[in-house]
Image (tube, rainbow, N blue to C red):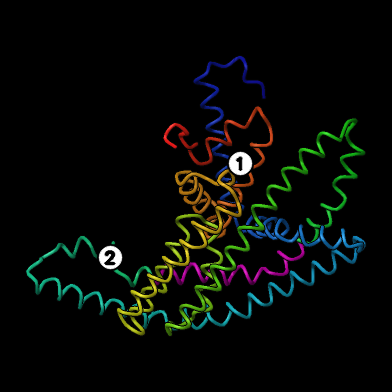
Amino acid sequence: MNTSGFAPASRFLLVAAAFVVVVAGLRAAAPVLNPFLLAVFLAVLMAPLMAALRRWGLGPGLSLTLTALSLVALELGLASLVGGSVTDFSANLPHYQEALNQRFASFQTWIDGWGLHLPWHLLSDLLEPGRVMALAGQVLGGLGSLLADAFLVLLTTLFLLLEGVGLPAKLKSAMKHPEQALKGLGQIAHNINHYMGIKAATSLLTGILVALWLGWLGVDFAVLWGVLAFLLNFVPNIGSIIAAVPPMLLALVQPGPAAALWTLVGYLVINNLVGNLLEPRLMGRGLGLSALVVFVSLVFWGWVLGPVGMFLAVPLTMALKIALDATPATRPMAVLLGYAPRDRSTG
């Protein structure tokens, strides 16, 4: 549709209307899109392994088979770690909610005993911990439903990996001068794989450290909270906070307030060491998103696609930033998505 004859306000309204229609379509198609987007995410993570197998002299078929077996082992391991824990946690959720509400009521009585009469009827919706645990149960339930679609995700991932093998040959046949396009796509793919590989490694380290720390403290479902920390570590800044709240509340119910305090200390130390020291050194400041962009993408894609959208929001936005940064014409947009440049005059 040619909009050159329209006034600027009319063009803006047309673009806004088209955007609303597209977003509504994405939200309606979320049950179909979620497995596909998750498969794209897994394909990006597994592509370096397949490329390494090809460099070692293995053929495309054998490389794809070994990559598929690795992916199956990964999904089976995740299902064995998470599946039973999610079921047990959901079964015990009413007990945890009741115990947390009792703790909260005792806290209200203690505060009132000091003569501080707060408007608890107004704060109950914000401070009621039982609702936070219910929200955690919904998120973990969404993770369990994803595991139910594991076969579809696996099959789609394998097709994407297989398609990626023949993509250079297709571009050479379809384009007159494919060298420049292949070079640009190769650089984009390398940067995306570099980001996702480092993020996956640091997220795995975060999840292992969290599981070990919570297990040492005696908090229930330590491995489950480690898996949740691994997944939410893909969401910078906000993800680590969300991942810490449910185990802190559970520690408050189970071992006691001291364990909840040590849980908080453990999360702060782990996330600062991995997220603020190790990850920036490995990744560099250029591969990052501003806090506002992270928050907006998290809210937007979470509203459109649900829990899967919240999990994939930052990786998708990061891939978009890398693609925009590869072209001089769109590089200013990539700069706007990233961190503010440091003022060199201040040292």
Secondary structure beneath label 2: helix
Which residue is under mark 1?
A: 321
| Nearer-the-camera pick, 98 or 274 | 274
Q: Which residues are magenta?
A: 133-156
The residue shown at (52%, 56%) is: 235
Judge from the rendering whether residue 185 lies leftward or rightward of residue 141; answer left or right. Answer: right
Residue 203, x across and y down, in percent? 57, 64
Q: Residue at x 55, y 35 (%)?
A: 335
Where on the picture, by quarter, is residue 175?
top right
Residue farthest toward the left in the current orientation of the protein: 115
Seen in the picture, residue 5 relative to 171 is either above or below; the reply is above
Amino acid under disc 2: Leu
Q: Observer-nearest residue: 34 or 328?
A: 328
**Quadrant of the rendering where the C terminus is positioned:** top left
Q: x, y percentage for residue 57?
A: 92, 62
Q: Is residue 322 above or below residue 13?
A: below
For marks 1 and 2, give the CA distance. 37 Å
Q: Is residue 2 above or below residue 125?
A: above
Q: Which residue lies under the disc numbered 2?
A: 127
The residue at the point 21 percent across, 76 percent down is: 105
Q: Is residue 106 left or right of residue 192?
A: left
- In the figure, residue 176 lies in which quadrant? top right
